[in-house]
Image (cartoon, helix red, strand yellow):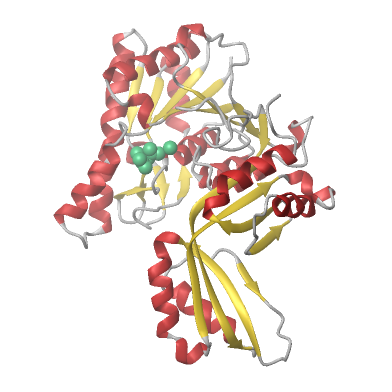
Amino acid sequence: MGRLVMKFGGTSVANIDRIRNVARHVKREVDAGHDVAVVVSAMAGKTNELVEWCRDASPMHDAREYDAVVASGEQVTSGLLAIVLQGMGIQARSWQGWQIAIKTSDAHASARILEIDGTEIINRFGDRKEVAVIAGFQGINPHTNRITTLGRGGSDTSAVAIAAAIRADRCDIYTDVDGVYTTDPRVVPKARRLDKIAFEDMLELASLGAKVLQVRSVELGMVHNMPVFVRSSFDKPEDIDPHGTPPGTLICSEEEIMESHVVTGIAFSKDEAQISLRQIEDKPGVAAAIFGPLADANINVDMIVQNVSEDGKTTDLTFTVPASDYNRARDTITASKGKIGYARLDSATDVSKVSVIGSGMRSHAGVAAKAFKALSERNINIRAITTSEIKFSVLIDAAYTELAVRTLHTLYGLDQT
Ligand code: ASP
Ligand code: MG
């Protein structure tokens, strides 16, 4: 017997029929003798609708009231799932964030979980064999007693945090894909599902554009060493052997991964824009004059490349920002042109970033060099490069994204055979 958290996303609870399907998944684990806490998202599309309503009501709405509104989607699905489970003869009770309580910071709309008291839920496993059905995405700030939400996609984070709080053996994330792939299978048909992936690699994949899990949930899993299993909610509940190994991807610590590749996966994002400042003065304080105002404007700068100047007087500096922030970034820079002092601003929005990830890179040389050669053989020009211990990224023309991803996928032996 074990203790499980089962998390179901929006498409898995999109209507009553699907909620019944979820209930059958839960029943299977309960029948197998497990203690179960379920975490649910709102019905697919619901949160978007609630967010829209807030904007409609007032474009400049109070973030506390936004949270009061958008947290309601999960209240509905947690109650409905408890009702369906009870109808199947399973003891079940719904829990809102404040009832547990899931205590968070007061950063409304992007609150961080501070503490969860799992005692009552654990007690009820013992006393009543009761399934806890928990509303994801929401918590409460203990000082103001107001409802908070954790940012879009936050139920993943709720699930992992609850798993840690109730000392679960595993956190199962049921979703509309059957695991984590080496890259997006829609772009590379030969993409492979990974049986296991290390927290660190998953963190990079999620941060760099793989949309399976909220980044913070992976961070939490890593901190608490909580194994997270990504699996499909569309497999028929009755076809699954609760004691077998179903298809899916286990996100776990590196030590648990026996067969490891140098490269784990390839991520890409087309949502990039490049800004280059030509002939900026090569003197102390220039970088601060550029990136300070961007930070103040809450614009996330990603890649930064500065040339070493030849004459010691001027140099070029290139950086990237999310495409959605491009106009603001350009305006911010132009507004401080006097302070920065540059001759020309060049920019491109039809660029994309392709990243190669693998903790195996730590102990292997020449991994990136191989990629540069392969890309040049395809005539793909690299505009900028960044590297870290376990990944490197190249900025290229967006038109070549698919070709680049496929080329690298094959190059590093990730293709399905
Ligand atoms: N319902 C919330 C959202 O759509 C939280 C989640 O689904 O994880 O962002
Ligand atoms: Mg999600």
Q: Position of residue 254 (x, y in %)?
A: 73, 38
Q: Residue at x 58, y 72 (%)?
A: 318
The residue closer to the viewer here, 256 or 184, is 184
Pick out the residue farthest to the left: 57
Please state if 23 lies on the left or on the right of 313 as rendered.
left
- Res 206 → quadrant: top right
Q: Residue at x 67, y 30 (%)?
A: 196
Q: Residue at x 45, y 39 (%)?
A: 158
Vertical placement of residue 3 versus 9, above or below: above
* Quadrant of the image containing the N terminus: top right
Q: Position of residue 279 (x, y in %)?
A: 59, 86
Residue 207 visible to an observer of this rendering: no
- Ligand 1 appears in which quadrant? top left
Please state if 103 lies on the left or on the right of 394 as rendered.
left
- Res 383 → quadrant: bottom right
Q: Residue at x 59, y 57 (%)?
A: 396
* Quadrant of the image containing the C terminus: top right
Q: Position of residue 271 (x, y in %)?
A: 47, 55
Vertical placement of residue 219 versus 381, above or below: above
Vertical placement of residue 353 versus 99, above or below: below
The residue closer to the viewer here, 152 or 355, is 355
Please state if 68 lies on the left or on the right of 324 as rendered.
left
For the image, the number of numbered tags is 0
Residue 410 visible to an observer of this rendering: yes
Q: Position of residue 227 (x, y in %)?
A: 62, 32
